[in-house]
Structures are given as C-alpha cells and as structure tokens.
Amino acid sequence: MATIHNEIENWLAADLHGELSESEQSALHAHLVDCAACRKTHHETKTMNKILEETLAHEKPDPAFERRMLAGFRNRIPERTGVSKVLANLMRLRATQITAVAAVLLGLVQIGRMLTGENAAPLPSRENYTSEGFVAQPPQAGATGADQSTSLAKSDELTRGRSQDLALNEPPPPAAPASRSELDKEAAARPMGLAAAKVAAATPQNLARAEQAEAKPGETPAPAQANRKLIRNATVQLEIVSFDDAVQKITALANEERGYVATTSSEKQANGKLRGTVVVKVLPENLDRFLQKVRGLGELKNQTLGTEDVTKAYLDTDARLKNAHVIEQRLVDMLKTKTGKVSDLLQVEKELGRVREDIEKMQGELKYWDSQVQFATVTVSLAEKEMEEPAAFLIKERSQLALYAPDVEKIYNDIKALASQKVQVTNAQLNRDYSGRVSATMSMLIAPEESDAVITRVKSLGRVENFQTQTERIAQGGSGMSENAKTKRDKVELNITISREEQEQAFQQTSLRIRTSSVDEKAKDLRAVAEKQGGRVRSSTFSRDPNGRELANVWLRVPMKNYQTLMQSLDSLGKVENVTVQRQDRTGTQIDEANAPADISIQVYSQGNIVSHESGLLATLRRTLAQSAGAIMWSLRMIGVAIAFLAPWVIAIVGVIWITQRVVRAKR
Amino acid sequence: MDASELEQYRAAIHGDREAFEMIIRTHSRALFAIAYGVLQNREEAEDVVQDSLVKAWKTRWRVRDAEKFLAWLATITRHRAHDIFRKRRAVSLSNETIEATESHPADTTAIDQQLHSALAALPEVHRTALILRYFEEMDYRTIENTLGLTNGALRGILGRALASMRKQLRPALASPD
C-alpha cells in the first residue's frame, strides 16, 4: 500500500502508541511483511520508542508533584475565610446576581427621583382626594374615602337624616300674632309656606338636589322655610334701542308681577344717547319670572342675583322689642301709681322716653326689613345701543417739507416774519455745526383758513423737496362711525427743515473722463460751459506728474433740466470716456425733478510721453527673479510653521506608543 | 470533553476554588509537560507551572468560553515558559561556561546527552507532543485538546518527531543493539 509506505513513520508511531484501529493495524502488519525498508524503520522506531520511554521516565515529575502545585497555589492565593467567603459564594448564585442588579437599578431610580424632586407614591392620596371632592361630605367620609361606594352610601344616609331633621324642625304657624310687625311677617311668610309644603312632599333625594341647586341663580325655588327672613336683590344690565320704550315696558312688566317701579333715573350723553337705571320692586316669588321677562327687552350684558339672610338679626331685634314693651308697660304702671318723690317721677319719665325711642327705632328697623323681605329689589341698568358713537370729529392736518436754499438764515428770518395771529411759530431752531454748515428746523401752527396761502408762500422761498401732508380724523366722545356728527378743522401743523443747497444729495451722479492733449485749457473751457448751463463748479484740481502726464478733476453741479445740454457740449472738448451714471431713486419722497441737482465729476487727462525706466527686458527679469525668491522664502517659512506645529504631536504619539509597548512587554 | 468536566471549568471560571484545585490536580502534569517541552529543565518547568496557575486564577474572568479553558491554561504556561527561556538565554550569554558545565551533569550517559540534544533540536510543538505522550501516556485526543490542535494532526506530528529523533540518534542506536 502506497499511502502506508509513504507515511510509514506516522503509522509506526501511532502503532507504538496504541492509537491504530484494528483494521489499520492489520493493514500495517501486512505492509511490513511485504516491505523490507519499512520493516527496518519499524525496528528502529521501536528501539527509539523504548529509549524515549526509559529516558524520559526519569524526567517525569514525581508523585508528589500535584501536592506541591496545590500547596504552592494555596500559599500564594490564600483562601478567603468567614464572611467574605460566604459573600463570594453568594455572589456566584444567579439569583443573587439578579437581585443585586435589581437593587442597584432601584437605587438609581430613587436617586433620580430625589434629584428631580418628583414625589414618590402620589397615586393613593390622589384617589382619596377625588373621592372626597366628589362626595363633599363631613370629614369622616373623607377619612374612610378609600372605598368610594361606602362613602357614597354614607352621604346618602346623611342627607336623608338631614331632611328628616328639617321636617321635624318645621315650626307650627304662629298662633297669636302680638303686634303689627308680626302680622306683616306672616303675610310675607305665606307664599313661602306654600313653597315649603311643596318641598315637604318631595322625596329626600329631590331635596338634596334642590339644596345643591340653591347655589345657581335663576333656578332657585322659593326659600324652603317660612320663618326665614330673606332679602333678595337682583341687578340686570341691558343694552336697549330706546330708553323710554324700555322704561315703559318695565313698568308694565312690574304691574303684571304685582310690583312697582320705585325709582327711575336717566342721563343724556354728549352724542344724544340715554343711559339710566330703573329700580323695580316685585314679590320675591315672582322675581325669577320677572327677570326672565326683563331679559327679553334687550341684549343682556350682566346679571346678578343675591340673597341675604337676615333671620337672626330680625329675631334678635324682635325679642329686644318685646322686652322693651314690657319695660315700657312697667314704667307706665309706675307713673300711674304716682307715689314717691317728684325727682323720682321725673327720672321714670325720662327713662320711659328713652325706652319709647328705642322701641320706635326697633320697630322702624323691623319695618324696613319687612319691606325688604316683602319685595325683592331689581335694579335694571339700561344703556342705549351705540353708546360709544362719537359726538364730533376733528380733522387734524399735518404737513412737512424740506427747503434747500443758498442762504439758510435769510429764509429762516423770512418764515419767522410770517408769524401773525393766525400763524403761530411754535418752534424755530437755527443750527450751525462745527464745520460752519447752517441748517434750521421750524414748526408752526396755522389757522385752517390761512394754511394754504402760508404753505404756498413758504414753498416759494426755496427748492422744495419731500412735501408731505397727513390728514387725521379724530373722533370725539366715542369711537367708530357716526352719520350726524359735526366735523371741525383743527389748526394745521407745518414742520419745515431748511438746509443749504450744497448739503442736498444729488439726484443723479455722473462721472466721466475726457482725454485731451491740453488739459489746462480744456479745464477752463469746461468751466465756461458749465456756467452757461446754470451749473456751478464745486471744486477742481490740477496736477502734473514727472512723466508729463497732466490731470484735472472738476466737480460740477447743474439742475437736472440742463443736464442733457451740458453733456452734449462736453463732446466738443475732447474724447469722452468711461461715463457712469448713478441715480438714487428715493421712494416715498416727492422730488422736483427739473430743479433737482445733478453732480458731474469730470477728469480731464493727457497721455504722458516719457517711457518709464521701469520697463524693458532687464527690469522684467529682475522683477521676476525677485518675486520667485520671495515666493521660495514664503514657502520655506510655511514649511517651518507646519513642522513646528506637527512636531510636538509626533513626539507625543511616538512616546505613548513606546511606553505602551514597554508596559505590554513587562506584563508578559 | 464531557459535561461534568465542562461544568468544572465553568465553576472555576466563576471563582469556585475547589473546582480550580481539582483542575490543578488533574491537569498540572500536562502543563508541566508543556513547560518542560520548552525549557527542558524540571525545576524551571515546575516554577513555570506554579506561576501559570496563580496567573490563571487571577485572570480567570478573561475566559469567555469554558470549552477553551484548558487550551487557555496551556497558552499561559507556554508563554510563561518562553519568558523564562528568553531570560535564561540572556543570562547564559554572560555565564556561558558555567551553564555548559551545569547543564551536563557527570552521571548522565552519552545516549542521554544525545537524546536531549536531539530533543532540543526538534520544533517546539513536536517536542511538547512527544513529552506529553511519554510523560503522561496521554492518548492522542487529550494531547490534541491540550495543545489546541485540530483533529488528526497529532499523528503526523508525532510520526515526524519520532522519525527525526530516530535519524539523529541512528549512530547511537546502532551501537547498543
């Protein structure tokens, strides 16, 4: 077999080491029988194996090797004892690990809550709160409020109990009225008693509902108890079309409801509209119906309904009154017996007077209350529609303009001279700044009929720019529109600013160059041309450089209307070049275009005729060389900068790598 | 590798000291063989095994796969042995003469000397495989596991190792027989 022969060494080794399967063994032995070379190798290998076994047996570790290893290990890694061992063992358990992680997470969450200030466990308390709020009952219900249904049941019981109490407390009708005030009281109580009977028939649940509804105005049934002294008041604010109509209707309504109009007051506004109040007294049980009807009269703006309980004060006063009656009777008896000294009698008389005064006062008080209780007071405030309509309009005119003139001071004085009774100069200011420029601002108030004439006069004094007029209509005594309000013109306000012409910004700016051979001459011609066209030379310069080049700069200002002709006449002076025109369109301002100034800056120049020594081949070469040397120096400098920038980084990185390598090697 | 063995490795990785000591009992000889394969010196090899065990215990958490625990242990041992070997060479350059006399004790026979030099001439894997086989009489599977070899590679390695030993020792072999 070729494979066995080729790999005879492997086969032999495996055979000696007992790693051949049976079939492999028989194959090997069959080959060894055939092949002499392999037999020889087999023999040698066997010997080799034997030597190895014998020799290496000496080198083998002795039987105590493991014990030594263990002892050395224990020596170098001492075993943990006691608590730490228990802990270490515990931490090995999966369950412990999970618990620990959970605890850490929980701790983190708690810390987070503390940091953010979130309140822990807010839910149960909120539940309590809602149940409390819903039931709105005595504290013990709130305290046990965890179970809502039980507390609800409790509250139900409670209301039932209360209604029973009410029924028990219902007093029998007053048997024998002692005085007139008592009678009055009963009369007032009768309708209430009717209502009370109705309520008594109702179920306790209904009663509870009615109690709740008491808070709402407009739906209240008559007071539940007959002996209550309740004062009911209502105020209504209405917007109506006609005041008089409304008052009539209210009177009719009051009659319908067995009431009356107590007072009426009205007030006329500047714009002819009426505003006023009507006080109506109606029977308390008809109050709600009356209010409903009144509301239909116009647009309701506001309504309030109030009830004041004066029962306690009333009963107190009543009791005191009875007491006073008794004292009075006793004093009268004392006078009747007529015994004792005169001074004593006088004393009794005096006392009797005081007591009677008290009685009268108390009776008056009771009467007042009775009247208040008997009738409910309704205060109706009425206002006619479009109350805010203006009574008159004022037309205010405001104008402003800018004047440009050569002599500011003269115009300033001219305008000041315009002042008269109908023209008031309110503000006049003449400014001269550090460079000697003069400007002025003026404000004047002009009577309406004079305004047009004055403004025209002012405009004629100089060049006008940016004339603006604003008209404003101011409503007086109200706002909005009105058809029949009067209109009045107020004084016209005029604001003027006066500046020198030079300060005016040119409407159009032109610059051009003229090439010519005789600069000086042409510059003079130019001036003559400009003057002919009504222009002014603002400044001019002349210069000649060593190369024979001549240069003259002339700045001109002409009115726009002469601009075109001037430009045409310039052509005769020389070759016109580089004409640029710039115009500033000022939006929102009025400009008198024909007279607006146009600036022209003209450069007259001649070509020089001397060749510069800075030209020619040598000069060019020299320049080029100098430039390239400069470029090389520059790049050298840049390289230096780059190196200086990078070097520390390179050194740092190399150092870190070197240290890391050392550390890694030391660890091995 | 059976399940109980795997469980033992896992426990050791998780810090079970008893499991680790059991591993020391069962596998320290193999580790010794590896160290000896590199160093061919018993005292040094023993020290290497001892150091490696301590280091393995300290860094046991680095092993993610319990199946590779044994191979990892072998790697630590081999690295440690190499370190010692390098140090020894550095020392021996200065003390060559002393080393020479010490490494050949008087009582060793000629064949022993030849055998050792032949062993030293072998590639490391071959030498270690041979030593594992002859020290511990390990079967091929276990040796392969310990050295991290693939299935069936060991047969060739041992075959070639034996053959080259045989060729080197042929003159010596011929004489005693």
Image: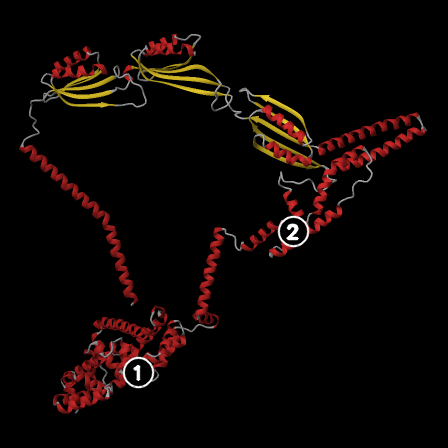
The percent position of residue B114, horizontal first and vertical second, equals 18, 83
- For image coordinates 69% across by 40% down, the residue present is A223
Q: Residue A395's image quarter?
A: top left
Q: Which numbered dot is residue B159?
A: none
| Left or right: residue B24 compared with residue A155 | left
**Distance between the alpha carbons at the discs numbered 2 and 1:** 90 Å
The percent position of residue A450, horizontal first and vertical second, equals 41, 9
| Pointer 1 chain | A
Q: Which residue is mark 2?
A: A139
Which numbered disc, 2 or 1, marks the residue that appears first in the sequence?
A: 1
In the rendered structure, which amino acid carries the disc numbered 1?
A: Pro
How many C-alpha atoms fall within 10 Å of the one at disc 2: few (<14), some, or many (≥20)? few
Q: Which residue is mark 1?
A: A61
Q: Are marks 2 and 1 in contact (CB under 8 Å)?
A: no
- For image coordinates 44% across by 63% down, the residue present is A101
Q: Callout 1: helix, strand or loop?
A: loop
Q: Specify the quadrant that holds the N terminus of chain A.
A: bottom left
Q: Mark yes or no: residue A424 visible.
A: no
The percent position of residue B53, horizontal first and vertical second, equals 34, 74
Q: Compared to A562, does A5 lie above or below?
A: below
